[in-house]
Amino acid sequence: MPEAFRVPRSEIDRRTDAIQRELRRAEIDGLFIVQRADLFYFSGTAQNGFLYLPAEGQPLLIIKQSVARARAESALEAVVPIDTVKAVPHLIADACGRKPNRLGLELDVLPVNEFR
């Protein structure tokens, strides 16, 4: 049986560093990712969930269903479960020390209910 594919940690770090430089340049505190393709690109998993990329610090992978699978697939260290979308701001504040003032969003794919 072939070994499972996993995006290398070095590649996830390279991608994260590049977007964090752009966030800092644009004075945006963090990026909230919901689209599965972007989630995979920056975390290595396409599990049902969200990714918060702060302008500085470690990304936070927030998973709705299979946390164990997300942890197996992703090289990210901070992988947390979530029961309701309403808990996202609190998880971000707990992980980063505060809620972001300016947040980058994927407005072309983010449902209005989740935005609110």
Image (spheres, helix red, strand yellow):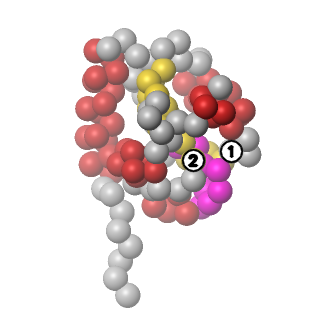
Name the disc covering residue 106, or none.
none
Q: Is residue 80 above or below residue 21?
A: below
Residue denoted by label 1: 82
1 or 40: nearer the viewer: 40
**Horizontal placement of 58 versus 20: left or right?**
right
- Residue type, label 1: Ile
- What residue is at 28 percent from the left and 40 percent from the top? 15
- What residue is at 73 percent from the left and 41 percent from the top? 84
Q: Is residue 58 above or below residue 21?
A: below
- Work out whether residue 81 can be spotted: yes
Which structural element holds mark 2?
A: strand
Instruction: Give the quadrant of the C terminus.
Output: top right
- What residue is at 61 percent from the left and 56 percent from the top? 67
Determine if the magenta segment contains residue 61: yes
Q: Nearer the viewer, mark 1 or mark 2?
A: 2
Q: Earlier in the sequence, mark 1 or mark 2?
A: 2
Magenta stretch bounds: 60-68
**Horizontal placement of 110 versus 19: left or right?**
right
- Residue type, label 2: Gly
Residue 58, image x and y in percent? 44, 34
Q: How many marks?
A: 2
Q: CA distance from mark 1 to mark 2?
A: 8 Å
> Label 2: few (<14), some or many (≥20) within 10 Å?
many
> Label 1: few (<14), some or many (≥20) within 10 Å?
some
Instruction: Give the quadrant of the N terminus.
Output: bottom left
Which structural element holds mark 1?
A: loop
Q: Pointers 1 and 2 in contact (CB under 8 A)?
A: yes
Residue denoted by label 2: 49
Determine if the magenta segment contains residue 101: no
- What residue is at 33 percent from the left and 36 percent from the top? 16
